[in-house]
Image: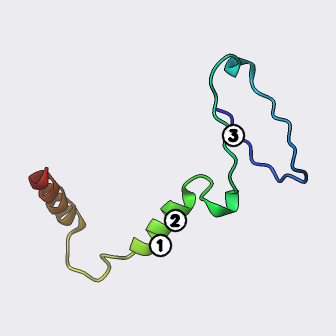
Amino acid sequence: MLREIITPVSNKYILNIPENMLNNQIEIVISEVSKRSTNGNNDVLNLIKNTAGILAGKTTNPIEWQQKIRQDWELEI
């Protein structure tokens, strides 16, 4: 896989295709980096930010809570 992030200054760009991709179907996608997460880190950071400390101050044992959640899932499947 080839991934390249650039800041174009013209509406033309020359793309060098690696030798091992020649004679194969390839997909070329152009999208603005600012409009999507570049590597998923933003999603992870948001998850941590929204759930950090969710059990703070509670008497719930996190291990028991997690086991109960898993049991509930097993019953639903």
**Which residue lies under the disc numbered 3?**
3
Mark 3 to mark 2: distance in Å?
A: 23 Å
Name the quadrant containing residue 15.
top right
Residue at 44% across, 66% down: 47
Q: Quick one: which residue is furthest to the front in this view? A: 11
Q: Position of residue 49 (x, y in %)?
A: 47, 73
Mark 2 residue type: Leu
- Please state if 41 lies on the left or on the right of 61 as rendered: right
Residue at 49% across, 61% down: 44
Q: Position of residue 39 (x, y in %)?
A: 59, 52
Q: Nearer the viewer, mark 3 or mark 1?
A: 3
Please tell me which residue lies in front, 68 or 28. Answer: 28
Labels 3 and 1: the sequence-earlier one: 3
Q: Position of residue 9 (x, y in %)?
A: 90, 54
Q: From the viewer's perspective, is residue 48 above or below residue 23?
A: below
Labels 3 and 2: the sequence-earlier one: 3
**Which residue lies under the disc numbered 2?**
45
Mark 3 residue type: Arg
- Residue 49 is marked as 1
